[in-house]
């Protein structure tokens, strides 16, 4: 296997609840044209294979046979160390996006040791804020005016930029180390959230806002597996201490009442 193919094999196209099976087939066709072989679909039920194959054509139909299917986005993204969310939607609660070309400059050094997912949302609504919490990077395709592209078109543009960066780029960045997977990060975030709730840092109105900002901050650090383990260990110890302190306080109060 060539180095270029190894790097391409570390990239997956993830389609979140696509409405039309034909767009899955067209996305597979675009991926195969650019040397990408991994397609993941997240949906409530498995898409119609005949409708997918119609747009994939015989050249890329084999990708549908090896396509991974998941009902939950978090499960689909567990192996990936970097998740790039493709979206044109903007808002105060969303991080600013990079162009697909700029995104590739960021993730290219990661590819030798890490798996990267490019995440695309449904055709009608795109990715929700809850979907975006798994991503470390936002990719937005620059357009002249109207910013809504068909799902397969958006996948095609990203696949082209991926291929150009991996196969034809003259830049040879130093490889980055293996970083924590989404599964490890989500476990860490769960412990961080529980610890912050214990000290009443997270409140009903600000809970989502602060956790989103904490995720965005930590995603820029490129934590390794051992880093997430250390942070989880600190949080577990903190939660244990808080629970035992509470038990001691209750026991003392009970003794005083006697």
Image: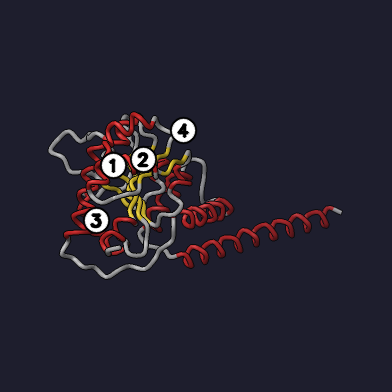
Q: Distance between the residues labelled 1 and 2?
A: 8 Å
Q: Distance between the residues labelled 3 and 2?
A: 26 Å
Q: Are marks 1 and 4 in contact (CB under 8 Å)?
A: no
Q: How crowded is mark 1: few (under 14 residues within 10 Å), some or many (20 or more)?
A: many
The disc, 3 or 2, on the residue closer to the chain's N-terminal end is 2
**Rendered location of residue 13, percent (x, y):** 33, 46
**Rendered location of residue 241, percent (x, y):** 65, 62
Q: Are marks 1 and 2 in contact (CB under 8 Å)?
A: yes
Location of mark 2 (residue): 64
Q: Residue shown at 22%/35% (left/top)? A: 149
Location of mark 1 (residue): 60
Q: Quadrant of the N terminus?
A: bottom left
As helix, strand or loop, the secondary structure at mark 3 comes to: helix
Residue 216 visible here: yes
As helix, strand or loop, the secondary structure at mark 1 comes to: helix
Front residue (pair 35, 176): 35
Q: In which quarter of the image is residue 258?
A: bottom right
The disc, 1 or 4, on the residue closer to the chain's N-terminal end is 4
Location of mark 3 (residue): 104
């Amino acid at each position: 296997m060539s180095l270029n193919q190894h790097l391409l094999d570390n990239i997956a196209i993830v389609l979140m609840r696509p409405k039309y099976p034909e767009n899955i087939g067209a996305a597979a066709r675009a991926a195969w044209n650019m040397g990408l072989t991994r397609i993941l679909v997240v949906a409530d039920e498995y898409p119609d294979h005949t409708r997918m194959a119609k747009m994939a054509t015989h050249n890329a139909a084999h990708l549908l046979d090896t396509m991974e299917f998941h009902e939950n986005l978090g499960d689909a993204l567990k192996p990936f160390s970097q998740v790039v969310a493709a979206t044109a939607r903007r808002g105060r609660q969303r991080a600013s996006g990079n162009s697909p070309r700029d995104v590739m400059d960021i993730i290219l050094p990661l590819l030798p040791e890490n798996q990267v997912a490019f995440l695309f949302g449904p055709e009608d609504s795109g990715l929700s804020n809850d979907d975006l919490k798994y991503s470390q990077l936002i990719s937005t395709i620059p357009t002249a005016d109207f910013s809504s592209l068909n799902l397969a078109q958006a996948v095609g543009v990203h696949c082209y930029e991926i291929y150009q960066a991996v196969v034809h780029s003259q830049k040879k960045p130093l490889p980055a180390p293996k970083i924590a997977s989404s599964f490890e990060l989500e476990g860490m975030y769960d412990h961080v959230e529980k610890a912050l709730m214990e000290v009443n840092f997270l409140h009903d109105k600000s809970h989502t806002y602060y956790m989103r900002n904490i995720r965005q901050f930590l995603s820029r650090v490129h934590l390794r597996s051992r880093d997430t383990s250390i942070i989880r260990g600190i949080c577990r110890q903190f939660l244990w201490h808080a629970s035992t302190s509470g038990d001691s306080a209750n026991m003392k109060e009970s003794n005083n009442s006697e």
